[in-house]
Amino acid sequence: MRHCIYPGTFDPITYGHLDVLARAAKLFDRVTVAIAHNAGKGPLFTTEQRLEMVRTSVAALPNVTVTAFGGLLVEFALDQRADAIIRGLRALSDFEFEFNMALMNRHLQPAIETIFVMPNEQFSYTSSSLVKQVAKFGGDVSHFVPPNVGAALKAAFAG
Ligand code: COA
C-alpha cells in the first residue's frame, strides 16, 4: 500500500487543492489530507471547521481520509507510516518556498520523499487568501471553492 500525506493549512480548501488531491488519489493507494493547526498563520476557520469543509469536499474520493496535525510534518508522516508528502506547484513563484521546505523535511527525515504535482493551469492564480479577500467584499468565489466552502465563507463574513 503506497500512502501519501497531502499537508496544508486549507484555510479554506479550494478547487486548486482538490485538483492536486485528485491527482494524488490516482497515484497512491491511500492519501491522508493533513490539516495543520497552524495558529501562526492566523486562520479564519478553526481546525474543526477546516476538517468539516475538507471532509465534505473529498467525500467522493474513497481512498482519501482527513485529519489534523500539530508539530513537525515529517514526524506526523512517520507516525502515519506514509511513504511520501505531496505538494502542488502552481507557478514558479511557489518553487523557492516549496524547494526549501522539501529539503528541510528531507534533512529531518530522509525516508520521507516529497513529490510535486502541477494543478490544472486554471488554478494557477488561486490561493486561499485571495479567495478570502474576494469573499470578504462580497465577490463571487464559486469558480474557486466548492459550494459548502462558499457558504462557510459567506457566513464567516456576514454582518
Ligand atoms: N491550489 C490553490 N491554492 C494552493 C494550492 C493549490 N493547488 N497549493 C497551494 N495553495 C495556496 C494556498 O491556498 C495557500 O494560500 P495562502 O497562503 O494565500 O493562504 C498557500 O498556497 C499555501 O497553503 P497550503 O497549501 O495550505 O500550505 P501551507 O503552506 O499553508 O502549509 C505546511 C504548509 C502546513 C505544510 C507547513 O507549514 C508544515 O509542514 N507545517 C508543520 C510544521 C513543520 O513541519 N514545519 C517544517 C516544514 S520544513
Image (cartoon, grey):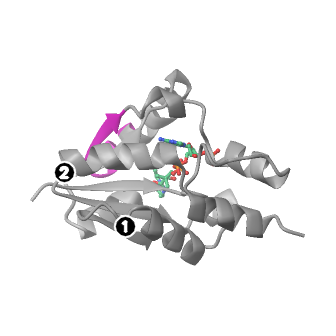
Secondary element under disc 1, as helix, strand or loop, is loop
Mark 2: C-beta under 8 Å from nearest atom of ligand 1: no
Q: Position of residue 70 (x, y in %)?
A: 47, 70
Alpha carbon separation for disc pair 2 and 1: 17 Å
Which residue is under mark 1? Answer: 59
Q: How many marks?
A: 2
Q: Position of residue 135 (x, y in %)?
A: 76, 52
* Residue at point 83%, 52% (across, down): 138
Q: Which residues are magenta?
A: 103-117
* Residue at point 84%, 68% (across, down): 158
Which residue is under mark 2? Answer: 28
Crowding around mark 2 (Cα neighbors within 10 Å: few <14, some 14 to 19, many 20+) is some
Secondary element under disc 2, as helix, strand or loop, is loop
Instruction: Look at the image and tell me whether residue 15 can be seen.
Output: yes
User: Of the numbered discs in the image, which one, if any, rests on residue 105?
Assistant: none
Mark 1: C-beta under 8 Å from nearest atom of ligand 1: no
Q: Which residue extends farthest right?
A: 159
Which mark lies nearer to you, 2 or 1?
1
Instruction: Look at the image and tell me whether residue 104 can be seen.
Output: no
Give the quarter of the image for residue 156. bottom right
Which amino acid lies under the numbered mark 1 shown in the image of this protein? Ala
Quarter of the image with the C terminus is bottom right
Q: Which residue extends farthest left?
A: 1
From this view, report whether residue 55 is shown above or below residue 73: below
Give whichever of 57, 89 is nearer the camera. Answer: 57
Queried whether the magenta region covers residue 125, the answer comes back as: no
Q: Position of residue 16 (x, y in %)?
A: 49, 42
